Image: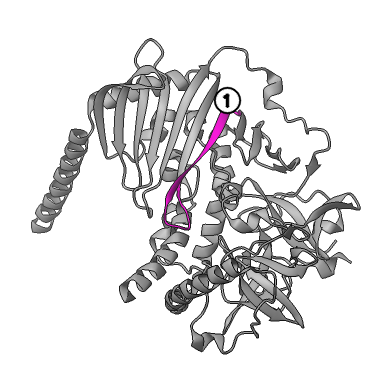
Amino acid sequence: MAKMKTQLLIVAGLGAAILSAQAQSSANIDPRAERILKQACDYLAQSKSFMATAEVWREHLDDSGQKVQFTRTLQLDVRRPDQLHAEIQSGHTDRAFWFDGKALTSLDRKRNLFSVAPIAGTLDSAIDRARDEFGVDLPLIDLAVSDPYKNAMAKVTRAVYFGPSAAMGFQCHHLAFTQDNVDWQVWIEDGPRPLIRKFVIVHKNDPGSPEFTGLIKEWDFSSRISDADFVFEPPEGAVKIDVLKNTGVPSAPTGGSSQRLYSPKEEH
Amino acid sequence: MKSTIYLSALLGIGLVQQASAAQWSSLRGANHGNMTPSAGATRSVAPTTRTETRTTTVQRSQPTVVTPTGRRDEHEQDRGRVEGNRQFERGRETERAHEVNRNIVVDRGRNERIVHERRRLDIGEDRRAAYRWSHYHPGMFVNVLPGGYRPLYFGGITYYYDDGTYYEPGPSGYQVVAPPVGAVVPALPEGTEMIYAPNGATLYYGAGAFYAPVANGFQLIPPPMGATVDYLPPDAVSTMLNGVLFYTARGVYYRPVMQDGVTVYMVTQP
């Protein structure tokens, strides 16, 4: 009997602790921030296809110790559930990526080289596999996941609504979210179309706390995105090269003994 | 001064650490990824990448240094003397920094994460554009050597070394030449990356040349078979062999492969 009482007390204590933690968590989440973010994410999730044109910035601590911003222009075409096309450009680089539900193709336009990684499935799984297996982490990829709200709120411990604020010339709601590893902010257009206009991620635990900033200049939810946009056509003279997994092992040899990159003696 | 030296050394270490955070950023990656954005939160080894000279104790074991003859006018010589003094002071600081670096345990896994994460950002070309050596390639001629150069005698030839670029006296000025394999330099070029040979040896790749750490500096070595680098030597040219694309430089073949979403190059045989 005494043992049962002790067990009941432990269970009650645990329950109280969980409820207290939940209450504490709820207290840190401003419902306005939660609601506005959900509206924007639901609008995005319900769109079968879209095109976003953005300017993205990423901070980097250079060898001098100076924090330098590098920028890229990005055009992201998404057709749910399993098609994506991204063009990433700057004065120094020009890359493009295609995912068609069967493979991820990477094109280095500057060198006219491309590779094909065998990744099949939906965008969600492809995004994770591309990152984890092939080291491909595209900017603003959070827009392409099937449930942007769940993805965004997965590890949020605090959410704040800062009220109206202009971004990219649009009147927006300014929201800020805290996680253990990153802080992030989002500016969502105030109006009939709750579009994300600005997105900032701060890697607060890393040296220099580098920031990522995405400025989404244009959204297109019309049907102007054609099937051809998601089909990779090699440019004239493009050469296919192998893709290396994170382990350093070629994943898709294109044939021939010359593919044995690590054992030259075995090639002959 | 002492605290400044050690601060500089630690800053150098931090410079490698910072790269570990290099991915374009996504909440998806932050919440679910197995990439380790916090890899830089712990110590990593930073190569000495600044232009510097060694202390006199170190210079004893360096290759014979000769004074360049002709080529420089009085103004240049004065500038060279001043620069030499500055370099001597910088060298003392860097020597300390190098000693500090040697006391740090090399964590290969962490360093490799740094390399991969830098690639994911695809900012290599942006960064290299800021390095002086990126504007020179073998075959180029210059009228005047850049300030801060070091004369270097190796294999019966007098070279002049400046931050990864090697010069030989030419008919009218100086010609940029290929790095003389075997020579030892006191400092690595700016932006040098740590790499690993297939046998596990820790090496450096800077300004398109490979270096191995030796007691008195860094020795130029032949490209190690199987090593992967982010960019080609400046004099590399493309060639197709049996339908496979290679780049060649100084008799060495590099094979392009895609890794981390960018083109990298593997030292190989055709």
- Amino acid found under the numbered disc labelled 1: Val
Of residues B86 and A133, the one drawn nearer to the viewer in this rendering? B86
Q: Please report the bounds of the magenta region as a residue range.
A: A60-83
At 74% from the left edge and 70% from the top edge, which residue is drawn? B168
Q: Is residue A262 left or right of residue A15?
A: right
> Quarter holding the C terminus of chain A?
bottom right
Figure colour scheme: one colour
Q: Is residue B95 magenta?
A: no
x, y percent for residue A205: 35, 52
At 56% from the left edge and 30% from the top edge, which residue is drawn? A74
Query: Is the magenta region chiefly helix, strand or loop?
Result: strand
At 72% from the left edge and 43% from the top edge, which residue is drawn? A115
At mark 1, the secondary structure is strand
Residue B167 higher or lower than A187, as above or below: below
Q: Which residue is mark 1?
A: A78
Residue A214 higher or lower than A226, as above or below: below
x, y percent for residue B162: 62, 67
Q: Is residue B108 left or right of residue A244?
A: left
* Residue B210 appearing in the image: yes
> Quarter holding the N terminus of chain A?
bottom left
Chain letter for mark 1: A
Furthest-top residue in view?
A192
Mark 1: few/some/many CA within 10 Å (<14, 14-19, 20+): many
Q: How many marks?
A: 1
* Residue B196 appearing in the image: no
Residue B240 higher or lower than B73, as above or below: above
x, y percent for residue A167: 37, 23
